[in-house]
Image: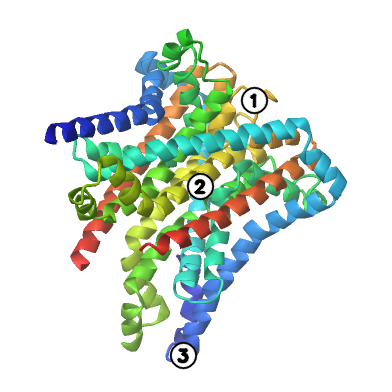
Amino acid sequence: MTALVPSSKSTSISNNPLSQLSKISWAWRVTLGYLTLMLFLPAVALMAKASTVGVGEFWRIATTSEAISAYDVTFITALIAALINGLFGTLIAWVLVRYNFPLKRLVDAVIDLPFALPTSVAGLTLATVYSNNGWIGSLLAPLGIKVAFTRLGVGVAMLFISLPFIVRTLQPVLQEMEQEVEEAAWCLGASRAQTFWRVILPPLMPALLTGVTLGFSRAVGEYGSIVIVASNIPFKDLIASVLIFQRLEQYDYAGATVIGTVLLAISLLMLVAINLLQAWGRRYE
Amino acid sequence: MNKERSWIKGALIGGAIAYLALVLLIPAVNVFVQAFKGGFGAFVSNIGESDFIHAVELTLLIAGIVLPINTVFGLCAAWAIARHKFPGRALVISILDIPFSVSPVVAGLMLVLLYGQHGWFGSFLEASNIKIIFALPGMILATAFVTMPFVAREVIPVLEEVGTDQEEAARTLGGSDWQIFWRVTLPNIRWGLLYGVILTNARAMGEFGAVSVVSGNLAGKTQTLPLFVEDAYKQYHTQSAFSAAVLLGCLALVTLVLKEILERRTHIKNVDEA
């Protein structure tokens, strides 16, 4: 708040239309300065380092079998987790918007837990609950299902972290949907299934896709909970972020940079995709 | 028909709650149960360890430094974006979101490449005897990076909704920029701002990935509370890991409660205005 003090210097010319301009450009200067220092400079450092690696070498490091397996574990697991949450997130959003039941407010508030709970705590508790002698893990162990310290554990951590994105994107859209349209569909003789597929789902699609993409992008970027819940063994449950971390620990800066650049590029692509999806969603408003 | 409907309703609610229990509720409850499994005394003795106390202090210190910086930046960015129509506005908002979408490890890596021993400023920093990586400044930079967008993201929509009418009226009545900000703009955006600050705080105190890359994770030196949780767990001190986790769990609970209160306030406000 003290940062706005210098703008009071312009009070002497406050009757001058220029003061408005100088204030705006002042806020802009802080914004651009901070973004440059904190965001652009580090990003440029990463890309500059990547460019010193050379195209052939970059490709070789980016496609080593260990890296490919890490992409596989990261992206495929994140995609599956996002899709599962697409299904259950829709169900949860539907139940929260359409039905009344005891403790509904509490359930609604709990959805945001992954936003608020530090990732290392999430990893710790998931590793305990889903371990072979944990509350849920001990029920699954007799069935031969191991969750903690396997790729399944990575998936559960990704489910945890991406759920709120889908529910919170869908809720407002569901809220605005008029139930009369569904009732009209029923009156016109549509079955429950037809109403769902033809009337409810289409307007929900942009929000659902946006939510799933947001959740996927968040799951891809997740590190803290996964590094704890997984065993981090290459070719088994090692994700790309952990691979970068391990490369850094081995002082292999080129290796870390190349995989980091690949991840950054994919994050930026996801960001573009999310923006396009949101623009598409606004057409329905 | 009605009977069938209520059957479907029950099944849907049951399914939703069961899924939430598996993924969110049981793990959350587990934190508290595990922390107090050895009784309250064990918990108290765990949080009395010197490494633990140092981790708490460091976490509070970093949040205390990052919070004001990112609040000021967030206000400036929100003002610049919301009060200014220009081409490429959507792009700027997207750029602001980068810290959320990029893996925190990549964020830490970028800082290492800039300020680390072999980084751009490495030799300069070494010559002037400034340590950033594996020291407090790096941890502050990493935390500031990952929490950068919160305030701006919460304040931009509020600023847009409030509009410029009141500010313009105040200006016509001779208010200075400073007066307008304190008396008109700030009261209008206060709940959104507070919300952003609370989210920034939760993430700043809970950040793990980016901080763990740049901190070196030395117990009693560069170990924050989330790093302490992982370290203790890896050393099979599960009990002290959960003692630290329960503190962070309480932070999450407080954050959620405040968030709920603020959402209700802003909602009520909207209803009043409508």
- Other-residue count near label 3 (Cα within 10 Å), few / some / many at <14 / 14–19 / ≥20: few
Viewer-nearest of labels 1 and 2? 2
Q: Which chain does the numbered disc 1 sit on?
A: A
B122, B52: nearer the viewer? B122
Quadrant of the rendered image containing residue A71: top right
Q: Is any part of residue B109 visible from this angle?
A: yes
The percent position of residue B104, horizontal first and vertical second, equals 60, 43
Q: Nearer the viewer, residue B52 or A202?
A: A202
Real-space CA distance between mark 3 and mark 1, rounded to the nearest whole angstrom: 60 Å
Which amino acid type corresponds to the residue marked 1 in the rendered image?
A: Asn
Which chain letter matches label 2? A
Query: Is residue B55 in view?
Result: no
The residue that mark 2 highlights is A213
Dot 1 and dot 2 within a common chain: yes
> Disc 3 vs disc 1: Cβ atoms closer than 8 Å?
no
Give x and y (percent) for residue A78.
Answer: 55, 37
Which one is in front, B149 or A213?
A: A213
In the image, taking residue B129 as reference, residue B71 lies left or right, namely left
Locate the C terminus of chain B and report the quarter of the image it occupies. bottom left
Mark with earlier residue (3, 1): 3
Residue at which label 1 appears: A232
* Identity, as a three-letter code, of the amino acid under mark 2: Thr
Q: Which residue is mark 3?
A: A17
